[in-house]
Image: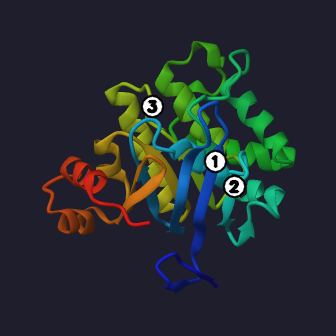
């Protein structure tokens, strides 16, 4: 059993960030890309980090995915410390970056085989999971087409597929609807909901209010590296007297900060 950020002990907390800080050097001095970030995410929950470009969302997700090492603070994924057990953490997560990370010459099926081998899965397990995922995400018609012929939306769905090939309990998605048209974005949103229904803990970043409103069980508003507000949409509306998330966002980032 672990302890959530709000102090409540919970057995199903799979993502925990405790006062995470990431500082980058620059010619003009240090840049605090993430400054004291704390939150948690449970199994079967979608937690969204909402903020504009440059708010620190990608940096935060990369620390949790072990791509970056925090300057200070602690992060835990499925009870594994990201600093001390990065290999164990990577076994527990599926990470979707803004870049698809796909190879145009591979077919969709070859893509999942490749990423399955990277995750040290047996050939039998790879084929089983591939069939399950193609059915789940309605990718069967694309199974033997080369990725170079895919639309942007089809590539994003395949990226989602390869991120779950090893059946991880934690999914981390950086701007999953980035650059997609309305129909493709809708398909991705529906896919993410399916993952939540399967009991995964899902952390996603977005700068799109509508995506956060439709998808997220709880939302953290990130601005200039700091968490300005955290809660369900209804809780945030009540706290900031906003009629919608846009009003909440501007009220939250304008509120005086402590510390």
Q: Residues within 10 Å of mark 2 (few under 14, many from 20)?
A: some
Res. 136 visible in picture: no
Residue 148: x and y, percent? 63, 14
Q: Is residue 233 above or below residue 79?
A: above
Q: Quadrant of the N terminus?
A: bottom right
Q: Which mark is residue 71?
A: 2
Do the residues under discs 1 and 2 have CB atoms within 8 angstroms? yes
Mark 1 lies on residue: 23
Q: Quick one: label 1 or label 2, which is nearer the N terminus?
A: 1
Q: Residue at x 32, y 29 (%)?
A: 182
Q: Residues within 10 Å of mark 1 (few under 14, many from 20)?
A: some
Q: Residue at x 27, y 58 (%)?
A: 255
Q: Residue at x 43, y 25 (%)?
A: 179
Q: Residue at x 18, y 68 (%)?
A: 238
Q: Nearer the viewer, residue 224 or 152?
A: 224
Tell me which corner region of the image, top left, top right, bottom left or bottom right, holds residue 127: top right
Q: In the image, which is nearer the foreground, mark 3 or mark 1? A: 1
Q: Quadrant of the C terminus?
A: bottom left
Mark 3 lies on residue: 178
Q: Is residue 107 above or below residue 20?
A: above
Q: Nearer the viewer, residue 31 or 204?
A: 31
Residue 169: x and y, percent? 64, 61
Tally of numbered discs: 3
**Alpha-carbon distance for marks 3 and 2?**
28 Å
Q: In the image, which is nearer the foreground, mark 3 or mark 2? A: 2
Mark 2: secondary structure: loop
**Alpha-carbon distance for marks 1 and 2?**
6 Å
**Alpha-carbon distance for marks 3 and 1?**
26 Å
Q: Residues within 10 Å of mark 3 (few under 14, many from 20)?
A: some
Mark 1: secondary structure: strand
Q: Quick one: label 3 or label 2, which is nearer the N terminus?
A: 2
């Amino acid at each position: 059993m672990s302890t959530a950020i709000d102090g409540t002990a919970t057995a199903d907390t799979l993502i925990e960030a405790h006062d995470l800080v990431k500082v980058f050097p620059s010619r003009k001095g240090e840049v605090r890309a993430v400054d004291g970030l704390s939150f948690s995410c449970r199994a079967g929950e979608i937690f969204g980090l909402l903020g504009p470009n440059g708010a620190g969302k990608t940096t935060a997700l990369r620390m949790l995915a072990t791509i970056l090492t925090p300057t200070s603070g602690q992060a835990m994924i499925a009870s594994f410390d990201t600093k001390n057990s990065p290999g164990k953490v990577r076994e527990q997560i599926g990470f979707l970056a803004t870049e698809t990370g796909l190879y145009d010459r591979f077919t969709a099926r070859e893509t999942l085989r490749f990423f399955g081998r990277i995750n040290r899965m047996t050939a039998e397990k790879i084929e089983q999971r591939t069939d399950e995922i193609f059915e789940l995400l309605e990718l069967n018609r694309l199974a033997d087409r080369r990725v170079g012929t895919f639309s942007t939306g089809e590539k994003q769905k395949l990226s989602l597929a390869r991120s779950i090939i090893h059946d991880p309990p934690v999914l981390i998605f950086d701007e999953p609807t980035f650059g997609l048209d309305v129909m493709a974005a809708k398909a991705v949103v529906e896919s993410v909901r399916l993952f939540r229904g399967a009991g995964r803990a899902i952390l996603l970043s977005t700068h799109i209010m509508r995506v956060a409103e439709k998808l997220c069980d709880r939302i953290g508003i990130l601005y200039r590296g700091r968490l300005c507000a955290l809660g369900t949409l209804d809780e945030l509306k009540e706290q900031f007297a906003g009629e919608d998330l846009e009003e909440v966002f501007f009220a939250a980032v304008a509120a005086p900060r402590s510390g």
